[in-house]
Image (cartoon, coloured by chain):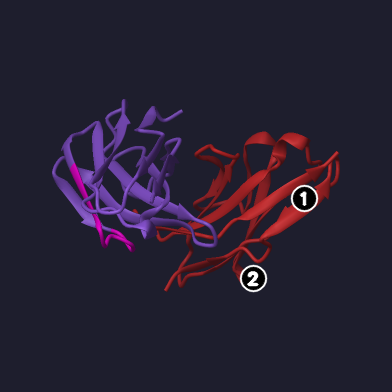
Chain colours: A purple, B red
């Protein structure tokens, strides 16, 4: 158990509204990640963080922003949600100080954009 | 570019039968390889990983995987499947950086 929680676990929202998902970890890991999971696509990286205020884009970052003001929290924001952002969102961490360390995943947030 | 292929979208086996889930990757150097399992409504749980050394890797829940460089494969095996193994299985490859590439998953159904 890597001590990762995600909130909310489920959310329904309307197109055009802002949405923020939170990932919280209790073990002071340096690297944190946001993925989305869609049928037929596996998991795809949205953004990742390598320290407080240090973030970078993944392969599907359009329409998403992130922030990390504290080591333990990594926030994912959809500025104006669209139906194509309906998905299951997973947060992950890497143990240790290297990005190459094994990634461990949170329980996920199921988001429905109507 | 790196890629991962899981050619079987669905697999059905009887309880007690052996299991092999296929994973093929495309990568120029020796990759880091992973298998994860996802039960319905849950996150991904690491089953096993290969970084280097012995090409036969043992994992949790009685699973093992074998890295075959010549075939660019990292197939997951279990000698006797239990009903609780029904889940979706994901293979992933990394170049040793933050960037993981996931396969599209294989959904396992176990018949009683």
Magenta-colored stretch includes residue A66: yes
Q: Tell me residue A39's x, y (percent).
A: 53, 58
What is the chief secondary structure element of the magenta stretch?
loop
Q: Tell me residue A32's x, y (percent).
A: 30, 43
> Spatial distance from mark 2 to mark 1, Cα to Cα?
19 Å
Quarter of the figure that contains the C terminus of chain B: top right
Name the residue that disc number 1 marks. Answer: B19
Q: Earlier in the sequence, mark 2 or mark 1?
A: 1
* Label 2 environment density (alpha carbons within 10 Å; few <14, some 14–19, many ≥20): few
Magenta-colored stretch includes residue A31: no
Vertical arrangement, residue A39 with respect to residue A106, above or below: below
Taking depth in this image into account, of B80 and B69 the one nearest to the observer is: B80
Asked if labels 1 and 2 touch by Cβ distance under 8 angstroms, the answer is no
Vertical arrangement, residue A31 with respect to residue B98, above or below: above
Q: Tell me residue B44's x, y (percent).
A: 51, 42
> What residue is at 63 percent from the left and 36 percent from the top?
B60
Vertical arrangement, residue A78 with respect to residue A94, above or below: below
Q: Is residue A110 left or right of residue B75?
A: left
The image's mark for residue B36 is: none
Q: Tell me residue A60's x, y (percent).
A: 33, 62
Q: Which residues are magenta?
A: A58-67
Vertical arrangement, residue A49 with respect to residue B84, above or below: below
> What residue is at 18 percent from the left and 44 percent from the top?
A67
Asked which secondary structure carries label 2, the reply is: helix
Question: Residue under mark 1: which chain is it in?
Answer: B
Question: Residue under mark 2: which chain is it in?
Answer: B
Name the residue that disc number 2 marks. Answer: B71
Picture quadrant of residue B71? bottom right
> What residue is at 57 percent from the left and 52 percent from the top?
B90
């Amino acid at each position: 158990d890597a001590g990762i929680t995600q909130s909310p676990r489920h959310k329904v929202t309307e197109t055009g509204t802002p949405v923020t998902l939170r990932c919280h970890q209790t073990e002071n890991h340096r690297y944190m990640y946001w993925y989305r999971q869609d049928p037929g696509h596996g998991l795809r990286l949205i953004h990742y963080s390598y320290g407080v205020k240090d973030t970078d884009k993944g392969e599907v970052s359009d329409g998403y922003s992130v922030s990390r003001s504290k080591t333990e929290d990594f926030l994912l924001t959809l500025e104006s949600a669209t139906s194509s952002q309906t998905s299951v969102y997973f947060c992950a961490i890497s143990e240790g100080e290297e990005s190459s360390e094994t990634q461990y995943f949170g329980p996920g947030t199921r988001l429905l954009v109507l | 570019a790196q890629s991962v292929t899981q050619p079987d979208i669905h697999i059905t086996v009887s309880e007690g039968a052996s299991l092999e889930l296929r994973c093929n990757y495309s990568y120029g150097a020796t990759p880091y390889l992973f298998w994860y399992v996802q039960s319905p409504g849950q996150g991904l749980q690491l089953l096993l990983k290969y970084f280097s050394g012995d090409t036969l890797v043992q994992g949790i829940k009685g699973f093992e995987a074998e890295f075959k460089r010549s075939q660019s494969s990292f197939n997951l095996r279990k000698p006797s499947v239990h009903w609780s193994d029904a889940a979706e299985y994901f293979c992933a490859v990394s170049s040793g950086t933050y960037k993981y590439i996931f396969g599209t998953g294989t959904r396992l159904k176990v018949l009683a």
